[in-house]
Image (cartoon, grey):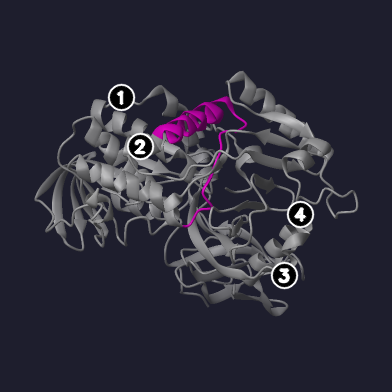
Amino acid sequence: MSFLLTCPHCGVREVADFAFGGEVSVRPRETPTFRELSRYNYFRRNVAGVQREWWYHRSGCRTWFQAERDTRTNVVLRVGLPGELGAELGVGP
Amino acid sequence: MREIFRSGRMWRRRGDLRDSYDVVIVGGGAHGLATAYYLGQLGVKKVAVLEKGYIGSGAAGRNTTILRSNYKTPEGARFYDASIHMYERLSQELEFNLLFSQCGHLTLAHTDRAMFVMANRAEVNRLHGIDSKLVDTAQVKRLCPPLNVSPDATYPVMGALYHPPGGIIRHDAVVWGYARGADRLGVEIHPYTEVTGFERSGSRITGVRTNRGTVRVGQVVNATAGWSSLLGEMAGVELPITTHILQACVTEPVKPLLDVVIVSSQMHVYISQSDRGEFVMGSEIEPWTTYRMQGTLNFLQDLTRHTLELFPQLEHARLLRSWAGLCDLSPDYSPILGRTEVENFHLSAGWGTYGFKAAPIVGRTLADLVHTGKTPELIAPFALERFYEDQLVSELAAAAVSH
C-alpha cells in the first residue's frame, strides 16, 4: 500500500490524490551567479529521514501545502499551509 | 567431469577488513562488481567491494533484466551501445552462462507524436550504427503475434521502434559472474559491511568508516544507486539526485507465448517472458521520493490493467510476486559518472531506471578512470559538473518509461 496524506483543507486522502512538489529548498539570493542558480535548480538534499516537502491537492481543493514526512517510513508527521510549519523542521507553531 | 557436480563457493569469504586498500568500491551490485572486475584486469591490487546487504541485493537484483541501446541522444546511444556489445561477449569472458537472449525489443507508439519521436530515435540510432527502425502495425503483429493491435483498443498500436539486438538476460547471473571474476582476480568482496562515513584531509578522502572498522583508502567509488545521495553527503559532495521506488511483478510460469520485449510509454508498462515462463512486468517510478522499498496497490492495478489491454490472453494468469527497488533519478535522465570535487571520490550514480544495462561499460570506464586518472571520452558528457554548467544530456524521451 502507499500512504495517506492530510490536506489542510480537505482532510485525510490517499496519496494518489496529490501531486508531489519535491523537497522544500532555500531560494538563492536575488541576483545569483549562474552556478548558484544551477545548484538551486538541480541539486537536492534527498535525505533519508524527515523531509519538508511541497504537495499539491490535485484531485481536491488545488492548494499547495507543505508536509514533513520521514522518507525512511513514509510516515507523515505534520502538514501545514506555506508559512505555518515554522522555520525549522519539526518546530512549528 | 566430477568437477561440474561439485558445488563450490563462487567467491571467497573474506575475514576482517585490511588496514588499507588502494580502491574501495561502495556497493556490491552490478556496477560495483563490474568496476572491481575490470580494475582486477588492469592489475590493480588491494581492491575491496563493500556491500551493506548481500551481493546483488539492491537494484541489480530487482530490475526487469532488459538490455537495449536505442537511446535518443548521440552521447547516450553511443554509451549504451558499447555496453550491449560488451554484454554480447560477457558469458564467454566470465565463463558463466548469463542466459542473454537478444530476442528483440519493441517500443510501441500509440500517437502521432510518439511515432515522430520514434522516427527521430531510429535516425539517431542508425547514425551510430545501432540496429533500430520504425515498423508499422502489420509488422508489429508479425513480430509479436499475441499482441492485441486491434483498432478498438483503448490506445491502438500505430507502430513501434524495433530494436533487434535488445533483449533480456539473467540479472543475478551478471552479478554472480562479475563477483566470481573479480574474486579470481584478487578483489575482496565484503558483504554486510556498511559504510558509515569518510575521513577527509583537504580535498581527499583518506579513510572509510564502516560497521566493521575503519580502513585507509587510495580511491573511492560510489556505486550505491538509490543511496548515492547519502554516500555523497558523507563525502561532502552534493548531488542532483532524488530517490524513488520503481516496482515490478511476475506471473506464475505459463507456456511460451512472448519472444520479444514489449514496451509502451503511453501505458507505462514493459513486458517480457522469462526463460522459466513467467511474464515479467514493470512500470514507472512513483513520483514522490522515498527510501522505503514497499510497493503500492495503485501500481498493481494500473500495471495489470494495461498489460491486459496488450495481452488479453493473460486474463486468468496469477501474479506470483511483486517488489520495489530504489532508483537514483537525475534531472536529465542520464547518468552521473566519474570525477567529483573530492579528487579521489568517483561516481556511478543518477541511474534512475536504466542502470542495469550499463553495468559492463560503467565498470570498464570507471576502472580506466581510477587506474589512469583520466576521464574516458565515452563518459565525459556525463560528468557531475554538467549540472552546475546547465549542459544537460536529456534522455527524457527515451528513458522516462523505465527499464
Q: CA distance from mark 3 to mark 1?
A: 55 Å
In the image, which disc is placed on residue B316?
A: 3
Expressed as whole percent of the image width and height from the top left, the position of residue B180 reads 27, 47
Q: Residue at x 30, y 33 (%)?
A: B367
Which residue position is annotated with label 1? B374
Q: Residues within 10 Å of mark 2 (few under 14, many from 20)?
A: many
**Of labels 4 and 1, the one closer to you:** 4
User: Which residue type does callout 4 highlight?
Assistant: Leu
Which residue position is annotated with label 4? B310
| Residues marked 4 and 1 touching at CB (< 8 Å) | no
User: Which residue type does callout 2 highlight?
Assistant: Gly
Q: Is residue B137 above or below residue B124?
A: below
For the residues beneath circles 1 and 2, the answer to whether they share a chain is yes
Residue bounds of the magenta highlight: B62-89
In the image, which disc is placed on residue B363?
A: 2
Q: Is residue B121 left or right of residue B185?
A: right
Q: Chain of mark 1?
A: B
Q: Residues within 10 Å of mark 4 (few under 14, many from 20)?
A: many
| Residues marked 4 and 2 touching at CB (< 8 Å) | no
Asked if the stretch drawn in magenta spans residue B69, the answer is yes
Q: CA distance from mark 1 to mark 2?
A: 15 Å
Q: Chain of mark 2?
A: B
Q: Mark 2 or mark 4, which is nearer the start of the sequence? A: 4
**Of labels 2 and 3, the one closer to you:** 3
Q: Secondary structure at mark 4?
A: helix
Q: Mark 3 or mark 2, which is nearer the start of the sequence? A: 3
For the residues beneath circles 2 and 3, the answer to whether they share a chain is yes
Q: How many marks?
A: 4
